[in-house]
Image (spheres, grey):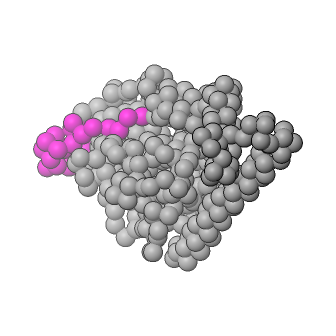
Amino acid sequence: MADSRRHRRRAVGASSSSQPRPATIDGWISDQERHADYVSSWQERRIMAVKYIRLDFFGFYGFQFPALFNDQGLSNLVEQNGCIYPDLIRVFYFNLRYRDGIISTKVKGVPIILDDDVWTNVAHLPIWDDAVKVHLGLQDFDRLLTFQSFLRHPEQQTNRRQLLVGGFKVEERMIHYLLVWILCPRATNHAQCSEQDLLLLYGILNHIHIDWPALIADTMVKAKKSHSYHLPYALLISRILEYKGVNIEGELVQATQVVGSEIGDTTFRQMGFITRGRVLIHKDDDHPDVVEDDDMDTHMADPVSAAAPSDAGPSNIPSSSSISMEEHFARLSKQLEDMSLAQKTHFEAIYDWQRSVDEHMVDQFLDLDV
């Protein structure tokens, strides 16, 4: 059934132009009165850098997001690569229209509607009845609280004006990178977390169905309206043009280059991550064994001296003449128990705080009118 529908739609697209159009502006745009506008404002519009990912590579390093992306139906979208058609992509955006909830365009005389057929057969995105339209925002959304829940050290002070992702946990940092470069790409401010980024990140981590077709379409419309916006989704649009039967003979073709396009170990290093076997950690959290032992000895010395009586004399460390070895270890054991209890209480407080954030966010998503 799906195959016959695909064949029928492709045939309709290809037949809308009786003869192949040339790879020039006369072939790209039917209305000659609009040629001047295209040449002056669109012919040199920049196309966003093309990036893609191999999910199995990240699965090797123990990341969970490949499975999360699969649950969202994003695997094909983030892994697709191949050639792009820069001139036709610009024409796609030049003719892009949004009217009555329908997004359409025309390239070389072929009408294109971004409907469920395109989203399911080209982008391979699922269509859910309960999908959340994240791009519309969320009322009473606490972006600071959500942002802090993604940090490696949430207790540290946060710059409320600039929510920078450098302090994110490894998993959250990689998902955010893929959001701003592939799924909802933008040309600048990749290190800053917008409210939409936070909503998307939270939704992915908590298995909340997101309306990706609506989000992608909204991003396309924004790119159309803003001339400072680099044109996104070059790979997806190129596949749509092929699917709709647009004649690509003689058109400028660019292949995605492996270096600089595939997101992999180079990206790790740029983010400040390092590998320890098959695990990725942030370089600031890397403590070799020897250093850990030295640090532990240093930290253990302070509690012992602090627990000694205030009138013990110049040295706070008990000597063998004033205290027996058994008493010394008894005191040390008591201090270790106190430290363990304090640490447990601290982590329980963090866990309760993060759980309250999760419950608060889930309630807001459930209250959102989809």
Which residue is situated farthest in the right direction here? Answer: 326
Q: What residue is at 51 percent from the left and 76 percent from the top?
A: 369
Coordinates of residue 101 in the picture (x, y in percent)? 40, 68
Instruction: Give the image quarter of residue 99.
Output: bottom left
- Residue 25 vs 258, above or below: the answer is below
Q: Which residues are magenta?
A: 25-50
Left-right relation of 15 to 116:
left
The correct choice, above or below, for 356 with respect to 212 in the image is below
In terms of depth relative to the viewer, which is nearer, 366 or 42?
Answer: 366
Question: Depth check: 153 or 309 in front?
Answer: 309
Q: Residue at x 24, y 33 (%)?
A: 24
Q: Is residue 38 above or below residue 147?
A: above
The answer to whether residue 17 of the structure is visible from this angle is no
Residue 243: give x, y in percent of width and height: 49, 42
Does the magenta-highlighted stretch encompass residue 36? yes
Q: In the image, is residue 325 above or below residue 156?
A: above
Nearer-the-camera pick, 5 or 159 = 159
Q: Is residue 74 shown to the viewer in this render?
A: yes
Nearer the observer, 7 or 332: 332
Q: Residue 180: image x %, image y %?
A: 43, 46
Measured as percent of width and height from the top left, residue 115 is found at: 48, 58
How many marks on residues? 0
* Quadrant placement of the N terminus: bottom right
Residue appearing at x 35%, y 53% in the figure: 162
Residue 166 within the magenta-colored segment of the rendering: no
Tell me: 328 left or right of 234: right
Q: Residue at x 40, y 44 (%)?
A: 191
